[in-house]
Image (cartoon, rainbow, N blue to C red):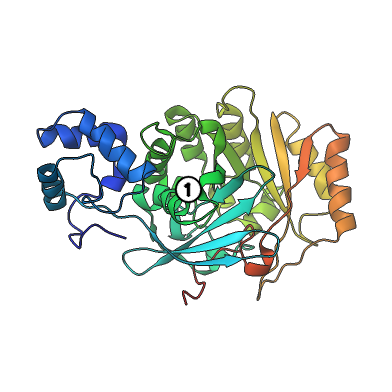
């Protein structure tokens, strides 16, 4: 949705609080107007300047001539019997992205996208099959949260944000960090950094940079315990092999007593044997971490299969016996292609 059709004008949804203050100062208005604008955009969900009744009419008119408001718009929501909801959102250039609402005991987790498509080429991922279209702007990343908060009954109960949807967040580094600053600002969405997690396939330089720039939870998609297997599954490993990746992860300053998360998708006949679990335990022996195990979510045309429940349990037990925190993450929404690795942005709008 957009305030007007003047796409050349700055989109106020892209602004962090300091940037909004700079914009307001340049217009000759009082600094507190920036706070009013930010709250109206992100907390009240205003999509027009006319709706911002706390601002003087002449100021609203000036804003409409010098800026615009745009965030993704919800087109369709698909619901699974397990409670998961896949949300299709339209971008202003005609592309579509998907977010996922995942039910929890007392709150919802919202999984959001950072790119339209993905260029990482992971062999097991349906999003990768769509190819890379473009990076999302900060307004399009944080705007998924605003739209879902404002336009769905579940929005008010969103407690956690995970940047694990379509795309590689750290390949869209600047916009991802900017969106996180908007999400965590008291004048923006007001989320605690403890409630936000960035997932990466392993872009080593950006992991180190993220540790310097912002305090946020980090989850790393590992999916193999040796370079040969990981390179076959994840082309990024050819550029940033396991030794470099694990070194960066050890240097990442996880805040407080929180632990970095390694995500491991279990694929039958590829990486899910007891021997694979033993190799993984040796690989991560010096890491302060927890391990999320995810049974591969099958989708039409996939060459890979889900391991048996017995194989999954045996893999987990090897890690538990070696005193790792190893949790089997229950995949939700697989029946509507909303589970991990299944997002494509191709859900039919009608």
Identify the image quadrant of residue 71: bottom left
Residue 225 visible in rendering = no
Q: Nearer the viewer, residue 203 or 332?
A: 332
Q: Residue at x 48, y 35 (%)?
A: 191
Q: Nearer the viewer, residue 44 or 170?
A: 44
Placement of 208 over or under 296, stated as above or below: above
Placement of 271 over or under 19, stated as above or below: below
Indicate the position of residue 189 as horizontal and vertical percent values.
42, 39
Q: Residue at x 83, y 45 (%)?
A: 316
Placement of 186 over or under 313, stated as above or below: above
Horizontally, is 194 left or right of 281 in the view? left
Q: Nearer the viewer, residue 99 or 259?
A: 99
Q: Residue at x 79, y 34 (%)?
A: 324
In the rendered image, the quadrant that contains the N terminus is bottom left
Q: Nearer the viewer, residue 238 or 216?
A: 216
Q: Residue at x 55, y 45 (%)?
A: 158
Horizontally, is 210 left or right of 341 in the view? left
Identify the image quadrant of residue 282: top right
Q: Residue furthest front?
A: 53
Q: Residue furthest top?
A: 256
Indicate the position of residue 214 as horizontal and vertical percent values.
45, 30
Horizontally, is 281 left or right of 102 in the view? right
Residue 1 visible in rendering = yes
Counting labels gives: 1
Horizontally, is 178 left or right of 5 in the view? right
Indicate the position of residue 184 as horizontal and vertical percent values.
44, 34
Element assignment for label 1: helix
Q: Which residue is mark 1?
A: 169
Indicate the position of residue 104 as horizontal and vertical percent values.
67, 47
Dot 1 surroundings within 10 Å: few (below 14), some, or many (20 or more)? many
């Amino acid at each position: 949705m957009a305030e007007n059709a003047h796409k050349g004008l700055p989109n106020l949804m892209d602004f962090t609080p300091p940037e909004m203050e700079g914009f307001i100062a340049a217009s000759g208005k009082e600094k507190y107007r920036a706070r009013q604008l930010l709250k109206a955009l992100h907390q009240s969900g205003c999509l027009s300047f006319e709706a911002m009744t706390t601002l003087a009419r002449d100021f609203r008119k000036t804003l409409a001539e010098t800026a615009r408001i745009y965030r993704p718009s919800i087109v369709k929501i698909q619901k699974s019997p397990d409670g998961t909801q896949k949300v299709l959102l339209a971008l202003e250039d005609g592309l579509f992205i998907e977010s996922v609402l995942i039910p929890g005991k007392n709150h919802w987790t919202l999984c959001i996208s950072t790119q339209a498509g993905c260029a990482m080429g992971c062999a097991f991922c349906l999003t990768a099959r769509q190819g890379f279209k473009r990076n999302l702007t900060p307004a399009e990343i944080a705007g998924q949260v605003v739209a879902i908060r404002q336009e769905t009954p579940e929005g008010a109960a969103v407690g956690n944000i995970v940047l694990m949807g379509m795309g590689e967040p750290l390949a869209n580094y600047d916009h991802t960090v900017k969106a996180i600053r908007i999400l965590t600002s008291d004048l923006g969405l007001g989320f605690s950094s403890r409630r936000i997690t960035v997932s990466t396939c392993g872009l080593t330089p950006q992991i180190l940079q993220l540790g310097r720039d912002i305090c946020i939870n980090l989850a790393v998609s590992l999916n193999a315990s040796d370079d040969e297997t990981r390179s076959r599954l994840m082309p990024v490993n050819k550029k940033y092999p396991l030794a470099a990746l694990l070194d960066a992860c050890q240097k990442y300053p996880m805040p407080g007593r929180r632990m970095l998360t390694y995500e491991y998708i279990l694929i039958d006949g590829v990486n899910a044997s007891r021997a694979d679990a033993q190799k993984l335990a040796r690989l991560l022996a010096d890491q302060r971490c927890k391990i999320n195990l995810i049974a591969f979510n099958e989708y039409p045309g996939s060459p890979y299969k889900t391991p048996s429940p017995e194989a999954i349990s045996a893999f987990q037990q090897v890690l538990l016996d070696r005193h790792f925190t190893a949790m089997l993450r229950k995949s939700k929404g697989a029946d509507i292609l909303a589970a991990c690795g299944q997002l494509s942005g191709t859900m039919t709008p009608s």
